Amino acid sequence: MPKSQLQCFGEEVYATACDLLSRCNNGRTPIERFISVVAWTISTRRPPTFGVVPFNPILGETHHVSSPNLNVLAEMVSHHPPVAALHATNEKENIETIWCCYAVGKFNGAAVEGKVHGKRQLKLQNHGETYEMNAPSLMIRFLPVPSSDWAGNVVIRCPESGLEAELCYGGQTMFGFRAGRRSAIKGKIIDSTSRKVLYEINGHWDSIVTVKDTNNGEVKVIYDAKEVISGLQTPIVKDPKSVWASESAVVWGEVSEAILNKDWEKATAAKKLVEERQRELARERIKKGETWLPKHFAVSYTKERGWNCLPIQKWVPPSPIQTTL
């Protein structure tokens, strides 16, 4: 794939054809906002493609994009193990997203499960609400037919409202749902205090997802993949001189161009140059006794809590790379 994994990570937040985060913020009640957050969480999943993979980001690589009022910044904060951090802010609406992501692969003979770890938060600061969620696993199956899909359990919690959602992506899970065919999603929204089920969630994350009010049986669409991810435009570089040297498109530019031109020999050579330069920088740091530190995040790790990445700046600055809704 002619792009970096860090770009794919950032696209989960900004690559939408409509402003779902503003819908979250504009909900009149806690339950309206929570349902919108569920829809936004579903929108961060994109159909994976079997057989092609993005580049492994280099240490310190960044991806910085603005999408109208949302400014998104991702940084590769560790290479061994690979850990990526993301900070997205909308200063106009007082919205903030902080993610930390690291995957662990597990091979079971017929498939590889890429379990995604890390803390994910969405803050609607005008409402004093913080939403915490995890991500499903990426399942790469070799038998009986090669394929890749999202699978597993996702929990979304808002401590301030006491609302909680349990989602199942595909297969049988500990929640007791059987989502059914590929891309299916099922779940429920509950009041965490009484454990009462308020809404049932049903659909497919690559088409339509609905919620059913358990009180009156009313069903409504909360997510339409066609509306959200169709007609997306490639980000445009508005000011080339202001693009950071660490930007994914700069780091992997020659490699991506060669892949698009199907010049595999040139792509291989360009990729080796990028990787060898990283090895050289690592040797220089060791020789000088220097420790590399992320530029945009304060990073910590404990065995009990795993990796944690906190942004250094309160607001992400506008980027010279921009996209439109």
Image (cartoon, helix red, strand yellow):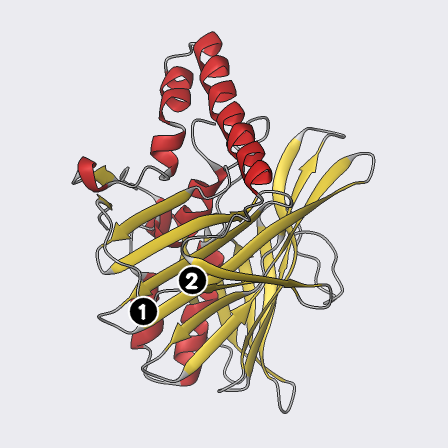
Which residue: 58% across, 57% down? 135
Q: Which residue is mark 2?
A: 40
Does residue 163 lie above or below 249 as drawn?
Answer: below
Amino acid carrying label 2: it is: Trp
Which dot marks residue 77? Answer: none
Residue with the most extreme front position: 288
Above or below 233: residue 308: below
Where is residue 29? Give x, y as percent. Answer: 37, 85
Circles 1 and 2, Cβ within 8 Å, touching? The answer is: yes
Q: Would you identify the image quadrant in which residue 52 lies?
A: top right
Q: Position of residue 117 (x, y in %)?
A: 63, 56
Foreground of the two, 131 or 6: 6
Mark 1, other Cα within 10 Å: few <14 / some 14–19 / many ≥20 = some
Furthest-left residue in view? 239
Q: Kindly state the secondary structure of the residue where label 2 is placed.
A: helix
Residue furthest right as drawn: 109
User: Visible in this render: residue 209?
Assistant: no
Q: Amino acid at mark 1?
A: Arg
**First reached walking from the N terminus: tag 1 or tag 2:** 1
Determine which quarter of the picture holds residue 188: bottom right
Q: What residue is rendered at 42% in x and 9% in y?
A: 263
Q: CA distance from mark 1 to mark 2?
A: 9 Å
Please provide percent x and percent y for residue 323: 24, 46
Measuring 21% from the left and 38% from the top, which residue is drawn there?
237
Q: Residue at x 51, y 41 (%)?
A: 59
Task: Name the residue tied to disc 1.
Answer: 23
Foreground residue, 226 or 110? Answer: 110
User: At numbered mark 1, what does the secondary structure look like: helix, strand or loop?
Assistant: helix
Pointer 2: residues within 10 angstroms few (<14), some, or many (20+)? many
Question: Measured along the vertical axis of the image, is residue 285 above or below residue 44?
Answer: above
Q: Nearer the viewer, residue 259 or 285?
A: 285
